[in-house]
């Protein structure tokens, strides 16, 4: 039930990744507006991520999922109503991006921790891989559907917001039917600690673990700069290839198809002997494909390279999520994943400067710069940070691990 609810929710979220920047650009004609929408979505994630992790470990994870899905529903329903009434403006998009961004840091850690509650430690890597496959299926279908709806004359944007609302409603109905899974009694210490103490406990454990620090750093480089190709894709459809909304949907769907394949491959090799080496290779391949996409002379070649970009990014990030949870104890899942979410929340740090580069020097230049930054960061950590080279499938299971010092 959790997995089935993930599908429409992810599809709707990925539609929003296409629809909101498209509407912002339509209203203003400025690439900077794309960066502002991304900033509005990411800023509350950055501010609330750690709080969301404490909530995931302290409150009912089912209740957290339910209330965040209600907020997601609101962020699609009201913009649709404003659009059909002729009152939708850029500040509305920024406001609802802020609201969605405020709910996301509570939703994601709770979902990841709930997955572990349902699957248990022996099946954790498979469950995380299945979750990632479902998320990437949404990345495949959502943008394609968004592009098809946006291409409908006169009412396309309204149809897109309406479809997003229906999908969030379906996801909410599945969450309501989930059982309120109880955490094991051995984790009762969580409830006896205050919120601040729980937050400090999670941070202390992360800082004391070189493996987690290395994995978080790898994820940060990819999230802040690598994943910006999604935010800036509107520029490639409108300015570079001149393919319109339908082409935008095709570009995003191609990346989603590659991502779905990447998630499936990670599920198949979830226990590869040297996961760090595999992740490093995926990061280098991603960087090369992203640079190639920025320089692609034709739309067809761009699609091929974008499929490689999607494959490598999904495999890289899926492997990163599994390794992070494998190197953390169960009672800290929510807090560790919320710290990991900070890397996603920091995406606007890359979105705004890359959008500025796109306005000044063109969208291709922004993608080349993004690819180079990811290559330098991933290769630097993978080759020169010794703890990363020792990253494996080590699983911490006791509270005493939290007191281990660096």
Image: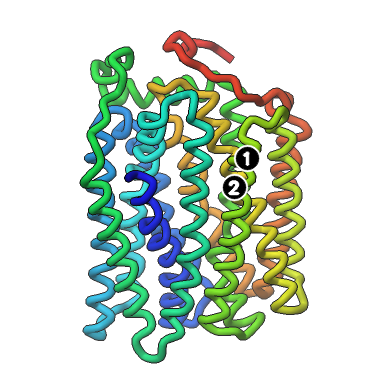
Task: Check residue 238 in the rendering and tell me which mark sits there, or answer none.
Answer: none
Q: Quadrant of residue 113?
A: top left
- Quadrant the C terminus occupies: top right
Residue found at the far top of this picture = 400
Q: Nearer the viewer, residue 188 or 370?
A: 188
Q: Quadrant of residue 336?
A: top left
- x 33%, y 79%: residue: 159
- x 62%, y 42%: residue: 266
Q: Is residue 376 rendered to the left or right of residue 217?
A: right
Q: How many marks?
A: 2
Q: Quadrant of residue 218?
A: top right
Q: Nearer the viewer, residue 30 or 83?
A: 83
Rounded to the nearest angstrom, the CA distance separating label 2 from label 1 is: 6 Å
Residue 66 visible, this angle: yes
Q: According to the image, label 2 marks what residue?
A: 264
The answer to whether residue 130 is above or below residue 364 is: above
x, y percentage for residue 163? 33, 71
- Quadrant the N terminus occupies: top left
x, y percentage for residue 131? 46, 44
Q: According to the image, label 1 marks what residue?
A: 268
- x 45%, y 62%: residue: 14
- x 53%, y 81%: residue: 246
């Amino acid at each position: 039930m959790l997995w089935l609810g993930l599908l429409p929710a992810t599809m709707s979220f990925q539609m929003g990744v296409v629809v909101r920047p498209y509407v912002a650009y339509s209203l203003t004609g400025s690439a900077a507006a794309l960066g502002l929408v991304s900033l509005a979505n990411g800023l509350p994630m950055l501010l609330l991520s750690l709080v969301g992790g404490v909530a995931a470990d302290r409150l009912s994870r089912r209740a957290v999922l339910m209330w965040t899905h209600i907020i997601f529903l609101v962020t699609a329903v009201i913009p649709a109503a404003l659009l059909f009434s002729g009152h939708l403006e850029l500040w509305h998009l920024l406001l609802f991006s802020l609201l969605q961004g405020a709910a996301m840091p509570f939703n994601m850690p709770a979902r990841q921790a709930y997955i572990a509650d349902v699957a248990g430690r022996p099946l954790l890597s498979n469950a995380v891989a299945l979750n990632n496959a479902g998320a990437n299926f949404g990345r495949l279908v959502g943008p394609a559907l968004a592009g098809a709806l946006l291409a409908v004359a006169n009412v396309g944007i309204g149809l897109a917001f309406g479809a997003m609302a229906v999908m969030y409603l379906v996801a909410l109905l599945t969450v309501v039917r989930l059982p309120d899974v109880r955490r094991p009694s051995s984790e009762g210490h969580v409830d006896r600690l205050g919120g601040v103490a729980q937050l400090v406990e999670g941070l202390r454990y992360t800082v004391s673990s070189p493996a987690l620090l290395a994995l978080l750093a790898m994820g940060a480089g990819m999230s802040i700069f690598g994943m910006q190709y999604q935010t800036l894709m509107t520029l490639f459809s409108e300015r570079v290839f001149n393919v319109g909304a339908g082409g935008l949907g095709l570009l995003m769907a191609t990346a989603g198809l590659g991502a779905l394949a990447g998630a499936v491959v990670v599920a198949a090799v979830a226990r590869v002997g040297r996961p760090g080496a595999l992740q490093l290779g995926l990061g280098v391949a991603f960087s090369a494909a992203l640079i190639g996409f920025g320089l692609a002379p034709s739309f067809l070649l761009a699609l091929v390279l974008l499929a490689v970009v999607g494959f490598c990014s999904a495999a890289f990030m899926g492997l990163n999520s599994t390794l992070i949870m494998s190197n953390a104890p169960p009672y800290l899942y929510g807090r560790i994943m919320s710290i990991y979410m900070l890397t996603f929340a920091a995406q606007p740090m890359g979105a705004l400067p890359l959008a500025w580069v796109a306005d000044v020097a063109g969208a291709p230049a922004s993608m080349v710069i993004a690819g180079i930054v990811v290559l330098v960061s991933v290769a630097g950590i993978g080759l020169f940070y010794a703890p990363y080279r020792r990253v494996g499938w080590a699983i911490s299971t006791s509270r005493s691990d939290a007191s281990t010092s660096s």
